[in-house]
Amino acid sequence: MESAALPLDQVLVGDSLQVMEQLPPESIDLIFADPPYNLQLRQDLWRPNLTRVEGVSDAWDQFSGFAEYDAFTTTWLTACRRVLKPTGTLWVIGTYHNIYRVGYILQNLDYWILNNVVWVKTNPMPNFHGVRFTNAHESLIWAQKERGQRYTFNHRAMKALNDGLQMRSDWHLPLCSGRERLRTNGVKAHSTQKPLALLYRILLASSNPGDVVLDPFFGTGTTGEAARRLGRRWIGIERDPQYAELARQRIAAVGAPPPAEVLQTHNPRREPRLPFGLLLENGLLSPGQLLYFGRESAISAVVQADGYLEYDQQRGSIHQIARLLQPGPCNGWTLWYYHDPHSEQRQPIDHLRKQLQETFYSPLEDEE
């Protein structure tokens, strides 16, 4: 593999630490990591009906102790930091067995933690012995590489996904089961396969179409499937050839990514910024006209010829005067209303701005 090129949309078989060393520095937009949890199970777990629980007993989850696990964690998180872009972010998932140690090491490596998200399992495995609370959640840490850098967060996409409500940090999603659970000869193909819904949400929230997503512990490819469905490029690293082949088959079955126009997340912050004064210059508002602070409010301000508003003998922009009336962060475009003579109702001045944006940024038609 040439160090100058990224092996996009491929499952790379090998040790994640060795493979990441071959990736170019600062080339990855987003990393999702589902590392070994270091569960250290000491005995089989049996249900009341005397059937054995298929727990995590794989060799890849075995460590001699905390010191070995911490060294392993430090090494792979350091490798991730090298390949992440300065604007990149990283998600890592775990349980109480490991997530606190991972968080401590993340901070020691100068990652900046953005959120701690709790995945609340709607169908958790019960505690069969009744000696502790049922473990009904896992934790996800979302961290950025460089504190203060601009990073991707598609707030409006998360709000739309959540029926118009701001997405919270407690995510209620079921475990991977039923037809989604990959099986080989009737047995779970992977003991810790994550649900597609979880990865879909993570990628939609913190990446954009065309971004490169890396999963250094790829398993059976849930990250790759979510990336394919959302038009992201992906790289998976998996040391088990059987898991890698299952992942390839699974992602190939998804088919071609959807068309680009359905993948874009609407974000007003990405729209071209137009100054309020353009509404005056283009005749959409007039000097001396009244703007109202709300659809039903009696509070009004007078539009000045230079694009300022005057209210109570004070002059300022639509945002400055709005902050006088409503302290704190506010957006004057959505708070100020004008009287629309066509509908005989008040409309937000943002309607006029959108008219201008269509005029400014629509392709010109050929003149006859």
Image (tube, rainbow, N blue to C red):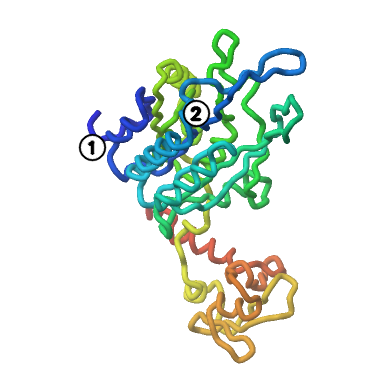
Residue 106 seen by the camera: yes
Q: Indicate the quadrant containing the C terminus: top left, top right, bottom left or bottom right.
A: bottom left
- The label shown at residue 4 is 1
Location of residue 60 with respect to 333 vertically, above or below: above
User: How many residues crowd mark 1 within 10 Å: few (<14), some (14–19), many (20+)?
Assistant: few
Query: Residue 256, position in %: x, y?
Result: 45, 26
Secondary structure beneath dot 2 equals helix
Judging depth in this view, the residue of 361 and 195 nearest the camera is 195
Query: Residue 107, position in %: x, y?
Result: 45, 51
Judging depth in this view, the residue of 280 and 256 nearest the camera is 256
- The label shown at residue 167 is none
Query: Residue 52, position in %: x, y?
Result: 67, 15
Report which residue position mark 2 lands on: 225
Q: Does residue 208 appear left or right of residue 301 in this picture?
A: left
Q: In the image, what residue occupies the spot 48% across and 75% down?
A: 277
Q: Does residue 2 appear left or right of residue 125 in this picture?
A: left
Q: In the image, what residue occupies the spot 69% across and 72% down?
A: 294
The alpha-carbon separation of the residues under discs 1 and 2 comes to 26 Å
Q: Does residue 101 appear left or right of residue 149 in this picture?
A: right
Judging depth in this view, the residue of 340 and 325 nearest the camera is 325
Indicate the quadrant where residue 324 lies.
bottom right
Query: Residue 238, position in %: x, y?
Result: 41, 25
Which residue is farthest bottom?
Answer: 313
Indicate the quadrant where residue 332 lies.
bottom right
| Amino acid type of the residue tagged 2 in the rendering | Glu
Location of residue 142 with respect to 23 vertically, above or below: below
| Amino acid type of the residue tagged 1 in the rendering | Ala
Secondary structure beneath dot 1 equals loop
Return the disc, 1 or 2, that comes first in the chain's sequence.
1
